[in-house]
Image (cartoon, rainbow, N blue to C red):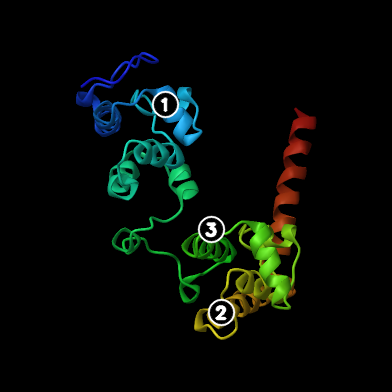
Amino acid sequence: MPARPGRPVKPADPREGARAQLAYDMSRVRELAELTLEEIEKITGVSTSSLSAATAGRQCPSWRTTAAFLLACGEDPEVWRPRWEMVADPRQRRAAGLPRDPGQRAVYERLRPEHVTDVAEFGLGLSQLKLWLGDPPLKRIHSLSHREGHGIGKSTISGVYQGRKLPTEDALTGFLVGLGLGPYEPEHHQWLDARRRLAAQALEHSRRRMRPRVPDPLRRPRLRQRQHRTQSFRASEQQS
């Protein structure tokens, strides 16, 4: 039975690829649920323009829109999650967080503290850890770190995993505690050890740069030879 009259929706052409196929199947689910876009908007709070775009197939909708659409139509979004992952861009996948289904979560790998080799990877590993632990907002991390006696500011928290510079040990501790990864957790100490290792490497690199250069005994004679050739060339130009 077709859906009741509402906003006209041009169906996606499933022959155009995986994204269009996903949009087409979502349209079919809506038709089977006998819902209009306006009715789904009332159920989900997602605008009809976003819902219409989700089934048009021209671009991948956000996971929030996709999940809300499917729930309103009586579907389990987690069953559809792998198909959405195939057509979503990296930014959308990061914003969506990890799947709730344990089987789907298992395929995700993150950078472990013992494998980081520089500051950028250190920040990336902490970002992935935050995502893995449910991607809590800064306000929650800030609140929990203060409650556990390792309070750090919100701006400091965001700087810990930006990967621009190595955070202080206190800031890293506050961040880990704010994620619920307390000192009793082995990975808490693994991240601290990784930070100390990178700090030691940075110190050694700085010392090498500060060491005085050994004079090159051949440099000065070569410089005199170049000066002599330049003077000879100018003299010959003046004579001509």
What residue is pinned by disc 2? 188
Q: Nearer the viewer, residue 26 or 165?
A: 26
| Quarter of the figure with the C terminus | top right
- In the image: residue 193, left or right of residue 156: left
- Rendered position, 164 above or below 115: above
- Rendered position, 45 above or below 116: above
Q: Closer to us: mark 2 or mark 3?
A: 3
Q: Closer to us: mark 1 or mark 3?
A: 1
Q: CA distance from mark 1 to mark 3?
A: 31 Å
Res 23 → quadrant: top left
The answer to whether residue 109 of the structure is visible from this angle is yes
What residue is pinned by disc 3? 135
**Amino acid type, residue under disc 3 in the picture:** Asp
Rendering coords of residue 115 (x, y %)? 46, 72
Q: Nearer the viewer, residue 23 or 34?
A: 34
How many C-alpha atoms fall within 10 Å of the one at disc 1: few (<14), some, or many (≥20)? some
Q: Closer to us: mark 2 or mark 1?
A: 1
**Amino acid type, residue under disc 2 in the picture:** His
The answer to whether residue 208 of the structure is visible from this angle is no
Residue 155, numbered label: none
Residue 39, numbered label: 1
Dot 2 or dot 3, earlier in sequence: 3
- Rendered position, 212 above or below 75: below
Rendering coords of residue 15 (x, y %)? 19, 24
Dot 2 or dot 1, earlier in sequence: 1
- Rendered position, 10 above or below 182: above
Q: Residue at x 73, y 78 (%)?
A: 149
- In the image: residue 9, left or right of residue 186: left
Q: Residue at x 73, y 59 (%)?
A: 154
Q: Secondary structure at mark 1?
A: helix
Rendering coords of residue 70 (x, y %)? 34, 38
